[in-house]
Image (cartoon, rainbow, N blue to C red):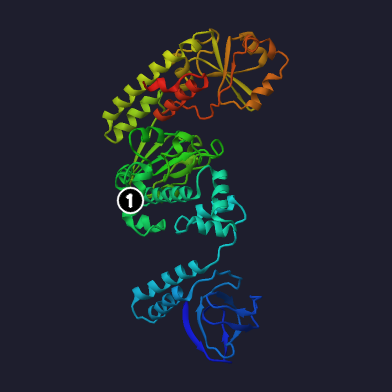
Amino acid sequence: MNRITHHLLEEGEELCTPPSIIYVAANSAAIKNNELSNVETLSEGKAYWMKNGSILSPANQYLKIYMIEIADMKPEEIRFTATEPCKINPILDELIVLQNSKSFLDRCNFQAKLWKLIGSMTEVQPLDDIDQTINYINNNSHKHFTVQDLAAKARMTPVSFARAFKKNTGIPPKEYVLDTKLKKAKELIVQNKGINIKDVALQIGIQDEFYFSRLFKKREGLSPTVYIKKIQNRVAVVSQLFLQDHLLSLGIQPVAAPVYPSIFPKTNGVPSYLEKPLEGTYLLNAEKTFNSKDIMTVDPDCIIKTSLHHGEQQTLTWMKNNQVYSIDFQSTWDDYLEQIAHFFGREDAVATIKKDMGQLEKRAKEMLRGVARSGKWAVIWVRNEEIRLYGSSNHACMELLFQTLGFKPHQDLPNSGYISITVKELLDLNPDKILFLWSTKAAVDKVARHPEWNQLKAVENKDIYVPSSQEWDPWGPLGRKHMIEGIISYFNLDKTLLYD
């Protein structure tokens, strides 16, 4: 068992120590024969890890120390920060009382408070740069620290630290700390069924739950109580599709949802327009086999599932009697929306979403008329060593471009889907305008080095378009809106007119 003892040594007394943490509560002492510490003097207000050493009380003074013996602790050097005796001594005295109690609850409290105390005394290594500071903040959202604390750890003045931090992150350190705490709060709320607001506040280092609620509402636009209602259905999405897009548009935040870390490495594996709405959601790596045990840790009430690309090896066996809503492949984005809305009795919301989307598409079509009808278009994706030429139908993006927004397709495009072509075959097609989607500039430049590239009509007329379209995915309401806004912005049209 872990144990604390209190020792008061008079002048010249020597105390042999077992492996333990020594806290010096008053005055200072000399040590000898300690295997793990290279210090020769123990200073007041400091803690030290010692093994098989001895402590000598100083001349003309008494020595007050506490010895904390930790069972099965591995011999290693532990660094501690200076802590004022007036703050630490009362806690250690309380722990001595608790450890001697016959009450099981008191002994449990002793263990919990002991480790909390040791953690608070442990010295954090100096932070060498802003990136280390960011990692420290991200990994310690449960702690309370000020900008002055962070600046001291970074060995900078508060003013210099704040300036360097904002230059690196774009926001002041105080704002970053609060953002980190609120992200952690959302994670706690979403991933822990039944957690109360007071416990959430305490776990992010805020003692006053009412202050936490005010802060949450000010920064998130809704109270924690209202936020909890967004996850009252506790839905997990098990799919290689971003069906969380449809759920979010219906006002439901999933407790677990798929992500693609290699495709969206900077935004937690999802397009940027989904990153903020999914804060707190448990993220499932859709690039690997889904693990049913991982999903069940967030205690979902129901699961939305589609056929998985890896076949039977990803068949999921559920450990609870959960409702599993299976969705077959749907041909349009609103078919998915209608099915998901039906599961949760939100059919009324579908009509509103579809009406708003129809108005958005109508305005966008009118704004794009001059661009879309000024020639015959071909859409290409350069993917690895492959050049894909898309047809005008049977693909969500192509249907949005050609059928909904009015882009005029070249008459010789494939009937549907896509085909792989060469530059020579593209020259035979010779469209007026070429739109490259999901293609990097480097991939397009490689194609452009082909000898016959410059013979293309679109190249001669400078009608080659390469938007940043990695996130263009119109299979859900939020993604569809994002793609339409992206097209309008790319062609330098006034995006505000979309919402007049």
Would you say 272 lies left or right of 342 here? Answer: right
Q: Which quarter of the figure is the C terminus placed in?
A: top left
Q: Can residue 52 be spotted in the picture?
A: yes
The residue sitting at the right extreme is 451
In the picture of the structure, the residue carrying the numbered disc 1 is: 213
Please report the residue visible at 54 percent of the width from the left and 45 percent of the height from the top: 166
Depicted 400 relative to depicted 154: above or below = above
Q: Position of residue 184 (x, y in %)?
A: 43, 50
Please report the residue visible at 60 percent of the width from the left and 73 percent of the height from the top: 75
Which residue is more in the foreground, 419 or 29? 29
Would you say 196 lies left or right of 495 here? Answer: left
Q: Position of residue 216 (x, y in %)?
A: 36, 48
Give SS at disc 1: helix
Amino acid at dot 1: Ser
Depicted 276 relative to depicted 12: above or below = above
Please report the residue visible at 48 percent of the width from the left and 67 percent of the height from the top: 120
Which residue is more in the foreground, 432 or 488? 488
Q: Can residue 196 be spotted in the picture?
A: no
Depicted 414 relative to depicted 153: above or below = above
